[in-house]
Amino acid sequence: MAFIEKRLSGPTSLSATTETTLYTCPTAQSTTTMIKQIVVCNTGINPITFNLSLVPYGGSASATNRLFSALSVAANETIFLDVSQVMTSGDFISAYSSAANVVVTISGVENAGGMVISGLADSAVTTAKIADANVTAAKLSQNALLSNNQAGAIILMEMM
């Protein structure tokens, strides 16, 4: 499948102090998602704090998986958080703020069932030809291993 740039969530209004799930990475076809930008808008007349968690599948939001904790947003201010976080099937993003009047929008890229590249070191792969979201040919250095993975994805890994 192709990489699809899209608005993943929002605009979503947050309730004061209540954890709200904003986006869940789809579980169909081994989807991966890259979070690219989070926009937080405080429409109120008072400053607020904002908390956002990236929660692994099966987990729950807590201080141990916060990306942003008590981030200050001034009254009538919008902040743009440029991030580069990868999510896998079932992972989710949740957030809450210290007061109402906060609107959150998340943008990113989804890839359903495509190629996974993991554990590459410099020069592990010298050439790769990619067509229709599949590797059709790969020239590997002597320290690299090419193996099949579930659901037809391909993993390229450096030998340890």
Image (cartoon, rainbow, N blue to C red):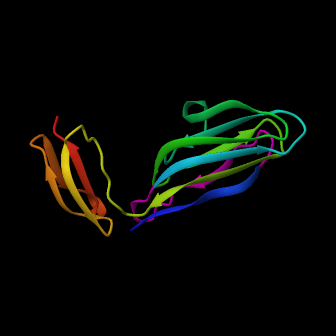
On the image, the x and y values in percent for residue 14 come to 76, 47
136 or 113: nearer the eye?
Answer: 136
Work out whether 91 lies above or below 158: below
On the image, the x and y values in percent for residue 39 come to 68, 46
The answer to whether residue 158 is left or right of residue 118 is left
* Image quadrant assignment for residue 98: top right
* Image quadrant assignment for residue 46: top right
On the image, the x and y values in percent for residue 118 come to 30, 45
What residue sits 62% from the left and 34% below the top?
68
The answer to whether residue 2 is left or right of residue 48 is left
Report the span colored magenta: 14-32
Work out whether 132 lies above or below 118: below
In which quadrant of the rendered image does the N terminus lie? bottom left
Q: Is residue 78 magenta?
A: no
What residue sits 25% from the left and 52% below the top?
155
What residue sits 59% from the left and 34% below the top?
66
Work out whether 121 lies above or below 12: above
